[in-house]
Amino acid sequence: MIPTKRPIPSPPTLPPSRPLLTKLGKKSGSPPKAKSKKAFLTLDTNIGAYDRTDPFHAFNTLIKLLGSLPSRIGGCQFKLTSEEHRLSLHLLSIVEPFVGLAPSKRTITRQPTEVLDAIIFHIPSRNDLVSLALSCHRMHDVVCPRHLEYRVIRCKVSAIRVWNHLIINRSLARNVRRLEIMDERSTEQEMVPSGILNSDTDLESTDDELGLHDKQEKYLVAALSKMTDLGSFFWSCNHSPISIDNVWPTLTRCQSLKEIDISDNLVFSNYTATGGRKNCRQIVLPDMTSVSLRSTSHAYGASKQPNLTRISGILNHCPALK
């Protein structure tokens, strides 16, 4: 019996195969790409690399350090290493004196006395000096009495003790901003530094009255030449043999003057500057804004024909007059 051949069954048809997907949803046929790693921010943790005088750099570095914490992976998120913690404290110590509420070691009161004296020198107002002196004991010791009692001086020509004090102490004379010369018969209260108010001196005692007036004039002119930053000058000396003619040349050499007020009949007397026309041209007061020259009701020093030489000189050489 011949065996019959059974037909070979064809392989079962399978549904069209779908491409396998990876976990990332990409085709298996495509070559895998290298996984990109996020670069972490690297900072120099050497605290010596950050200058204490540069708070802006320290502040920016601190922001970068704290801003990198949320991007860290795993247990390192929101955590600082020991080096980063030490760096953050160092950066805070740099920034805090400039923005913090804690008392700073870099405040102005820690500056040397010479530096504070140079700064306070540029404060002309006595009210501002009082406010500064009331701020702390340190400022009070610098302002009083070196500046507060020397901003305004009001006294008579006969106060030789005041002029001698300013001649000797030139650093104190430059602190005077306003000088008021009172009449010898005035009953107004003088305003002089307390250290020389009741000081004993033999400069005012002399038997020769004319010699005394010459001495007063000499010391006044010498003290006036030491007031290099004088801003206002007031003259009401009507009953003294001392003439404004002898004070005027020294006064006009003070380049910081802003205001002149003279009440004296002798201001309209004949005046000729020593040195001729060449010296007159040198009288230039660039900061002068106010000038008042007036006579008094007293007959002493009055002239029937007033001379306006001083007025014309001021008008020609003071461009800032208002």
Image (spheres, grey):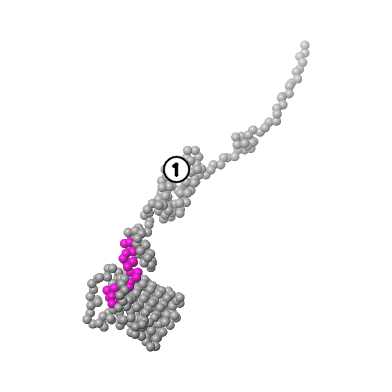
Quadrant showing the N terminus? top right
Numbered-mark total: 1
Vertical side of 94 occupied by 239: above or below: below
> In front: 223, or 129?
129
Q: Which residue is mark 1?
A: 80
Q: Is residue 307 visible?
A: yes
Residue at point 31% right, 71% down? 191
Q: Quadrant of residue 316?
A: bottom left
> In front: 300, or 53?
300
Percent x, y of residue 184: 30, 78
Q: Please provide the residue range marked out in magenta.
A: 140-162
- Helix, strand, or loop for circle 1? loop
Percent x, y of residue 132: 36, 62
Percent x, y of residue 172: 32, 69
Q: Residue furthest top?
A: 1
> In front: 57, or 3?
57
